[in-house]
Image (cartoon, grey):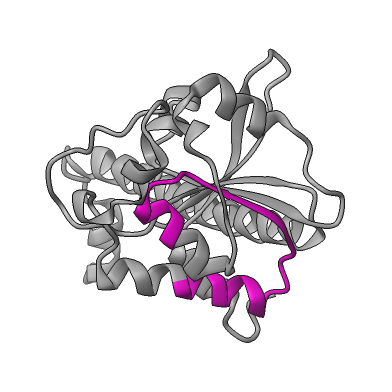
Amino acid sequence: MPVSMNCVRRWWPNPWWIGPLRLLGGFAALLALGCAAMAIDAELDEAQAIAELRQGGHIVYLRHAARFKGPRENLTVSSSAAEFANCSAQRNLTPTGQEQARQLGRYWRELGIPVARVVASAQCRTRDTAILAFGQAELEQRLFDLDFLRALLLKPAAAKGNTVIVGSDAQLRELTGVDLGYAELAIVQPDGKGGIQVVARLDLEDWQEAAEPGWW
């Protein structure tokens, strides 16, 4: 009786590499599932963070939008108001940075996020980011002082509005170890030890996605 090819394939011994290859495929599948789960979690985190901001009562630290390159300024907490106002000696917002600030403000208005207070470092790029985004700013050169900034970040926000603090990346990094990109913001809360912690981060792409119809 002739032997079918199906039978031959069924009983022919597998090459030595088939087992490890199948195992590797299983690991790849698990890794893909894990990455997909992380992506879903990240999206939910962003949605929850924006939903919280829409309710108000949060403290937000916003890094200024994109700036020109150049030598670092020598501004400090003891610099004069005239030195802070001299934009010709500072690394100011680029046209892209100006548009980033405007976009952020539009997204906040479209999503109905309430703003109770805006405090900005007196540098030109932080001041301009705040005004272009929110139309207002309390200029505060003491944001260079980490103790002052920590106290401001720990101060409760208005129950029905959010407090936005606009500064540079260095100060938040010193306090939390978190590096923000241009026009990226962090929602902060007390860490229970006298310091602050970042509980959520949102960049312009997150806001753009949230403003699209059907995202919620």
Q: Residue at x 62, y 70 (%)?
A: 108
Residue closest to the eye, 91 or 40? 91
Q: Residue furthest bottom?
A: 213
Q: Which residues are magenta?
A: 102-128
Q: Is residue 139 above or below residue 43?
A: above
**Percent x, y of residue 193:** 69, 13
Q: Position of residue 200 (x, y in %)?
A: 59, 45
**Relative to 183, is 192 above or below?**
above
Quarter of the image with the N terminus in it: bottom left
Q: Position of residue 37 (x, y in %)?
A: 55, 52
**Image-based side of 50 in relation to 82, left or right:** right
- Horizontal placement of 48 versus 98: left or right? right
Residue at 47% across / 44% down in the picture?
A: 121
Lateral position of residue 141 relative to residue 23, left or right? right
Q: Which of the two residues, 168 or 9, is positioned nearer the viewer here?
A: 168
Considering depth in this image, is 35 or 66 the residue closer to the camera? 66
Q: Please, is residue 209 above or below residue 80 in the view?
A: below
Q: At 42% from the left edge and 62% from the top edge, which residue is drawn?
A: 128
Give how far across and how far down residue 158 sits, in percent: 82, 48
User: Is residue 117 in the magenta section?
Assistant: yes
Q: Nearer the viewer, residue 65 or 145?
A: 145
Q: Point out the residue furthest to the top here.
A: 193
Left or right of 6 in this view: 104: right
Q: Is residue 65 magenta-colored?
A: no
> What residue is shown at x 71% (from left), y 66% (from top)?
113
Q: Quarter of the image for the C terminus: give it.
A: bottom right
Where 12 sits versus 72, above or below? below
